[in-house]
Amino acid sequence: MTNLVIVGSVALDTVKTPFGQVKDALGGAATYASYSASFFTKPAITGIVGIVGKDFPNQHLQLLQQRSISTEGVKVDNKGKTFRWEGYYEYDMNEAKTVKTELGVFADFKPQLPGSYEDAEYVFLANIDPELQMEVLRQVRKPKLTLLDTMNYWINNKRSQLLEVIKNVDVLLLNDGEARQLFETPSLVKAAAAALKLGPRFIIIKKGEHGALLFSEGSHFSAPGYPLENIRDPTGCGDSFAGALIGYLAKNGTSNEKDIRKAIIYGSVVASFNAEDFSLERLRRLTYAEIEKRYGEFKRIREF
Amino acid sequence: MTNLVIVGSVALDTVKTPFGQVKDALGGAATYASYSASFFTKPAITGIVGIVGKDFPNQHLQLLQQRSISTEGVKVDNKGKTFRWEGYYEYDMNEAKTVKTELGVFADFKPQLPGSYEDAEYVFLANIDPELQMEVLRQVRKPKLTLLDTMNYWINNKRSQLLEVIKNVDVLLLNDGEARQLFETPSLVKAAAAALKLGPRFIIIKKGEHGALLFSEGSHFSAPGYPLENIRDPTGCGDSFAGALIGYLAKNGTSNEKDIRKAIIYGSVVASFNAEDFSLERLRRLTYAEIEKRYGEFKRIREF
């Protein structure tokens, strides 16, 4: 049975950084998130929900299947092309600059969960139209923990629909800029307090190389960033973070704050590896032993 | 005997933020640093070395003296005016914008340590001309720990002199932008490695609201930022951080990494209080019990 459902884009990315480039490489939020979750979820099987075109290489789906990820929820639409994103990073690597976006079949994406996904207890709604995210929530029967991501585009263009879906999830994930923008305050503390009032039990604010913050009613956690010597491509780090985080929770069948703190560190660990190479290259070489080793380093760098 | 010497500016600041303003208020790196050190240093007496003009209110010197800070090293030059800085912060509060700087008597500052300061074991060289910082180092006989701060102006205009003084100190303090600029790399890990090669045993990189990093040979520490709900004026936070840090070390007569990690947290605590009000207003109301309470919160926000 599929216990973790991840809904979002499956894409072909063309990316350039000061350290190299790739063309039409495997990408997309749901891809990064499900692959990252797969380090933790066996035997709690992950199902991915997305859409690709006739041009999507079958080997990419096989790659996910080899990680025990169900691709039953990935629709292959032979009438169009796969979602493509082209972008680049400048020297500081903190912000992706988009050159172009070709939505292709993703423009008509209507997420439809296979029957075997409907009893999943863990759900990650990666960044898509908040109305579609709401549609997915209606299709899961008894979720134990729902995690929501978004982006500034939806804050600008579908604010009320976004606020509506936020009211219906357990954990809201934002980066620091989005948190300030959505709640119109420079203070992340005030933004988190406003977000908690809407309904979620937990607010996670991602700060890139500076780590992440967790806010709940009356409590706060500050996760360190990992000091990477060589960053080659940060694409997919946010989604790797979210996928590993919810994968860890799904594996352990938990949703309490103590475990969410640990899950945030596992998310940070997998995201830090992801940045070391293009596309999913580093994740494909990554072992669970490496994850545990770096988790130990995260413990040591904050001891005082 | 004066066991901690702090050398730097004593100033009158005119500051505007979205939350208020002050005119000709007490400021300056050496002022913030010595006041912050005074929470820790009794009975290890702190001496301040600086220069002020005939217009400097005597009550400001008395304020420092009441904290057991020796002002014997502060020269009063009746021929000119006190150093004045005018600046403002915009909504995000991360960067000070300078409106004007009037050096006054500070233009001819030649730091001269009183005889009773020459055996001090702890020295903080706040941001001044690196040639003057080198002069001070020549005047202390047997320092146990020397801490150096600087700014982008000296990186641009006196790079070789700055590198020379870096070679002669134990701890180098930089903010993240300065570290990237001085060592010409986007990677803070590489910048810190390059800095360690020059001579210092420890490199501390300040990241404002994101906390601070400590690098030594083969080790790394990540200190969290404190999630402040109300920031009124960040002026002097970097100097409060440095002053509390070296004050804690001077009080305990130590310079090992374990204690430097703790000292960084004490520095972060005092800096976080300093941001809550203009000039030294919050520090003047601050109690040691409040410092210890927030130190405990810094521990809790790190637990996983």
Image: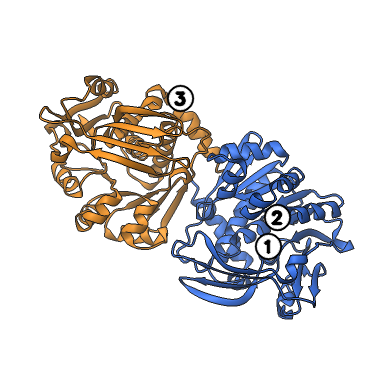
Chain colours: A orange, B blue
Q: Nearer the viewer, residue A203 or A229?
A: A229
Q: Mark 3 falls within which chain? A: A
Q: Nearer the viewer, mark 2 or mark 3?
A: 2
Residue B227: which disc?
none
Between discs 1 and 2, the one toward the N terminus: 1
Instruction: Identify the residue shown where x is 36% and y is 40%.
Output: A238
Report, in whole angstroms, how far the alpha carbon at label 2 lies from the one at label 3. 40 Å
Specify the farthest residue to the left.
A79
Residue A60's spot in the image, x, y percent? 26, 23
Q: Secondary structure at mark 3?
A: helix
Determine crowd level at label 2: few under 14, some 14-19, many 20+ residues with C-alpha closer than 10 A.
Answer: many
Three-letter code, disc 1? Ala
**In front of the other: B95 or A117:** B95
The percent position of residue A13, horizontal first and vertical second, equals 30, 32
SS type, badge 2: helix
Left or right of residue A69, residue A177 in this image:
right
For the residues bearing labels 1 and 2, Cβ distance under 8 angstroms:
yes
Question: Looking at the rendered structure, which numbered label has been put on residue B246?
Answer: 2
